Structures are given as C-alpha cells and as structure tokens.
Image (spheres, rainbow, N blue to C red):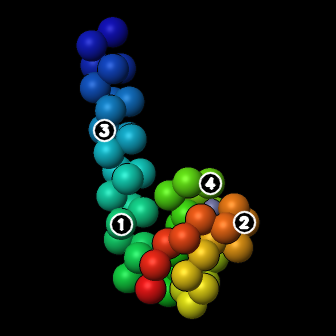
Amino acid sequence: MEDAFLDELDERGRASAAVVVNLDADTRTCPACLHVYAKGPVRCPECRLHIGA
Ligand SMILES: [Zn+2]
C-alpha cells in the first residue's frame, strides 16, 4: 500500500546516491547498465557509456 510505494522510492533514491558516491571510490558503477568496474577508464567497459574522469 502506501508504505510499499514509499519503500520503493527510497530504494531507488539510495541506488542513485550509491552511483554518485562510487565516482570517488576505487570502483565505479555505470549509471546506465550498473556494471561495476575499477576506476580509470572514462567509458563503461560494458556499454561504452562516457562517464568522465
Ligand atoms: Zn555501462
């Protein structure tokens, strides 16, 4: 019901926050395909999305 709806929103919010945090971590999570890779390449090795330095 309403609680489940709010939980879903919160879960999505946490996932987005985790992607942002990972830009400064030793690993990055591609925001497009969620592939996790070691920082270094400016493109996701999985989907070639340009992430930036
Ligand atoms: Zn990707």
Marks 3 and 4 sit apart, C-alpha to C-alpha, by: 20 Å
Question: Mark 3: which amino acid?
Answer: Asp
Q: Secondary structure at mark 2?
A: loop
* Left or right for 19, reference 40: left
Q: Secondary structure at mark 1?
A: helix
Residue wearing tag 1: 20
Q: Quadrant of residue 1?
A: top left
Residue at (28, 19) in percent of width and height: 3
Residue wearing tag 3: 10
Residue wearing tag 2: 46
- Closer to the chain start, of discs 2 and 4, is 4
Question: Mark 2: which amino acid?
Answer: Glu
Q: Looking at the image, which residue sits at the far bottom? A: 40
Residue 37 coordinates in the image, percent (x, y): 63, 76
- Closer to the chain start, of discs 3 and 1, is 3
Marks 3 and 1 sit apart, C-alpha to C-alpha, by: 16 Å
34 and 7: which is toward the camera? 34
Residue wearing tag 4: 33
